[in-house]
């Protein structure tokens, strides 16, 4: 990065943060601080919902996913438009009618205080524990590649997001997210244009797409019923619907983005904006990764994309072995380049046998490159067993730093940091709002009489959660497995929370006590199953939700039967 | 909890040109989703 990149990067990041803090500095009313003052139109809400979901990892990892496994990951988003239609039609009108600040406040109105506190506590526990990951995950990649100090990267980005989120609350979050999404869209379009311009002469988009397709990178939809396949149309439709419904309908970091719109219409249109754009957007990000793959078939890629780790371990006593691997990689890459040229030459051939033979030679040559990469990863592990051999997160950032012109590099780093800040801001805002509205305001004597004091309390809670996130991220650098532990923890709690909300919306005869004990029993069941079974942790979402709904229904039926028996006994 | 009464804007026009009801908007979004899936299938076939 040179001075131009730093100018673009700091201008975009600090400029947006300062604008958000300055523009919302005078906010004192709870409506403005917690809901954005009912001023946001559908465009702001739509971008804010999108920015909340899109973390830095979206832009670092998803192109890498496209590079390594192709664009099939797009199927994961197939349930999202359907979930957003359900949220628009069933969830949002009720939240707005009741004028709630948090989704859990709705549980208090529908059931009772204990169920509301249970919902809020599960959200705070899950989000609070994962608070550091949103900052830590991109910081570790950026600091590794760019040579920045990890602790400083975590602290500075954390303090920046705390500054404007404390100052302007929900309004500052939505305002900054609108501009951060503009930077993100601008950066990704720039990367796509530069990539297309860097492809070999005469290949063009169509040629590149044919190469990617022949290498199996463009299989978008898999209709197979094989449960061992990771991404299929069915897992995307059903699993995606389930996950999106719990995320958009019950997670306060999303609910807060759309309940505070200028009107119900603006909130609904903001959500429909996401329902329309999410699949095309994810497709384009994955396609970008697949095109980076084609680019690196013509331009030699590093044998291992985390070059810092490779350089660190390839010296000393290992030098000869690593050098031999690099030599084999150069040779294998030269061969695949030759075979691709041969296949492109005969692709239009009318003789199917010739084309098929050339395609097979090309795919075999590519498999040999992959074999050398596997060998390289084994060598890294032998040199240091703690090395992370998954390098797909480093593919896109390597391309950016090596291929983009100065200025564009700064813009793309700004994309990553903007995405980290925007999702972090929503998270802090939601944690502070839930703490204030569902706990502080509920249990503090006379707190409801002084709303300005509640806003001041929310500012302190925002700072508290932000500092906790920074502390967690600094601690996480010593124990990287925490990230996976936090993801598992999320799945353990998410299902039960969705179960409570589904009962609230769709099973009108079930009351607070039944759902409260049903949810606690379901949560206990999930814990027991987690410690006794060895199934994929995503299944706990489904188990937790199903168990909560079923147990609430059974408990309510038992209470109804007992109540009826009591009445019969008392009646003469 | 007795559900609060429905506000007039809930059943009203979405104010989107070409759509008179929210059901129409949801139908359009659903149809667009189906189109996206079909186009993705077609895309995979063309470049396979």
Image (spheres, coloured by chain):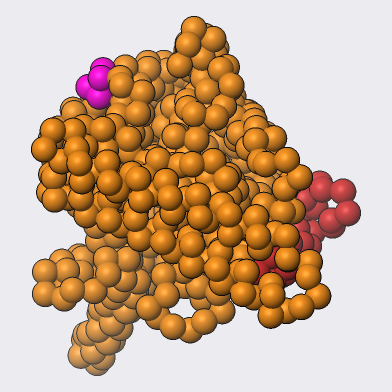
Chain colours: A orange, B red
Q: Is residue A175 above or below residue A208?
A: above
A270 over A538 or under it: above or below: above
Q: Residue at x 48, y 11 (%)?
A: A2
Residue at 61%, 65% (x, y): give it: A214
Which residue is found at the position 39% from the left and 58% from the top? A370
Question: How far from the left and from the top, in percent, is residue A523?
Answer: 21, 65
Q: What percent of the width, then of the height, locates residue A125?
A: 22, 46
Whether residue A182 is visible here, answered yes or no, is yes
Quick one: which residue is furthest to the right in this view?
B18
Residue A213 located left or right of residue A30: right
Position of B28 with respect to A487 (left or right) is right
Q: Quick one: A19 or A216, which is closer to the camera? A: A216
| Residue toward you, A340 or A158 | A340
Magenta highlight range: A149-153
Viewed as shown, does residue A126 lie left or right of A28? Answer: left
Give the prevailing secondary structure in the magenta stretch.
helix
Counting from the top left corner in percent of width and height, residue A301 is at 45, 42
User: What quarter of the picture does the N terminus of chain A occupy?
Assistant: top left
Q: Quadrant of residue A494?
A: bottom left
Q: Is residue A402 above or below residue A255?
A: above
Quadrant where the C terminus of chain A sits is bottom left
Residue A461 visible in the snapshot:
no
């Amino acid at each position: 990065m040179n001075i131009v990149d730093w100018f673009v990067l700091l201008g975009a990041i600090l400029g947006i943060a300062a604008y958000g803090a300055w523009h919302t500095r005078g906010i004192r009313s709870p409506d403005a601080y917690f809901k954005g003052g009912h001023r946001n139109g559908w465009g702001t809400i739509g971008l804010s919902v999108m920015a909340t979901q899109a973390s830095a990892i979206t832009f670092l990892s998803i192109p890498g996913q496209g590079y390594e496994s192709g664009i099939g990951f797009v199927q994961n988003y197939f349930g999202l438009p359907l979930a957003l239609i359900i949220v628009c039609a069933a969830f949002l009108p009720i939240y707005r009618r009741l004028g709630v600040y948090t989704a859990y406040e709705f549980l208090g109105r529908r059931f009772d205080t204990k169920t509301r506190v249970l919902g809020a506590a599960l959200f705070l526990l899950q989000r609070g524990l994962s608070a550091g990951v949103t900052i830590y995950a991109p910081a570790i990649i950026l600091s590794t590649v760019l040579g920045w100090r990890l602790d400083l990267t975590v602290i500075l980005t954390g303090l920046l997001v705390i500054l404007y989120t404390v100052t302007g609350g929900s309004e500052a979050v939505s305002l900054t997210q609108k501009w951060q999404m503009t930077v993100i869209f601008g950066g990704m379009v720039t990367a796509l244009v530069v990539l297309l311009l860097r492809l070999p002469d005469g290949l063009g988009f169509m040629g590149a797409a044919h190469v990617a397709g022949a290498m199996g990178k463009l299989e978008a939809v898999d209709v197979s019923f094989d449960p061992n396949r990771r991404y299929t149309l069915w897992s995307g439709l059903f699993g995606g619907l389930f996950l999106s419904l719990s995320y958009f309908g019950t997670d306060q970091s999303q609910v807060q983005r759309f309940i505070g719109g200028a009107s119900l219409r603006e909130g609904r249109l903001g959500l429909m904006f996401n329902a329309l754009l999410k699949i095309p957007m994810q497709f384009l990000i994955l396609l970008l990764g697949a095109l980076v793959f084609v680019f690196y078939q013509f331009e030699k890629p590093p044998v291992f994309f985390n070059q810092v780790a490779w350089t660190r371990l390839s010296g000393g006593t290992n030098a000869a072995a690593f050098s031999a691997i690099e030599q084999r990689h150069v040779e294998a890459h030269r061969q695949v380049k030759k075979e691709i040229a041969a296949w492109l030459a005969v692709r239009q051939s009318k003789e199917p046998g010739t084309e098929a033979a050339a395609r097979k030679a090309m795919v075999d040559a590519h498999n040999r490159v992959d074999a050398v990469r596997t060998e390289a990863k084994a060598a890294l592990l032998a040199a240091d067993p703690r090395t992370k051999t998954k390098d797909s997160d480093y593919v896109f950032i390597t391309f950016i730093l090596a291929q983009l012109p100065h200025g564009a590099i700064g813009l793309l780093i700004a994309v990553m940091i903007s995405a980290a800040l925007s999702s972090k801001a929503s998270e802090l805002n939601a944690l502070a709002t839930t703490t204030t509205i569902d706990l502080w305001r509920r249990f503090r004597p006379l707190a409801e009489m002084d709303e300005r004091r509640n806003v001041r309390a929310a500012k302190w809670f925002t700072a508290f959660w932000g500092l906790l996130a920074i502390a967690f991220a600094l601690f996480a650098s010593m124990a990287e497995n925490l990230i996976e532990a936090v993801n598992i923890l999320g799945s353990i709690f998410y299902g039960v929370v969705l179960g409570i909300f589904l009962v609230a919306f769709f099973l009108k005869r079930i009351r607070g006590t039944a759902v409260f004990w049903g949810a606690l029993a379901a949560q206990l069941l999930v814990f027991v199953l987690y410690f006794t079974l060895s199934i994929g942790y995503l299944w706990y979402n489904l188990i937790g939700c199903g168990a909560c709904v079923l147990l609430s229904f059974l408990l309510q039926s038992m209470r109804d039967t007992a109540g009826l028996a009591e009445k019969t006994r008392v009646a003469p | 909890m007795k559900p609060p009464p429905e506000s007039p804007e809930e059943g009203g026009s979405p104010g989107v040109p070409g759509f008179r009801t929210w059901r129409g908007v949801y139908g359009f979004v659903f149809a667009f989703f189906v189109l996206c899936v079909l186009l993705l299938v077609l895309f995979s076939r063309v470049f396979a």
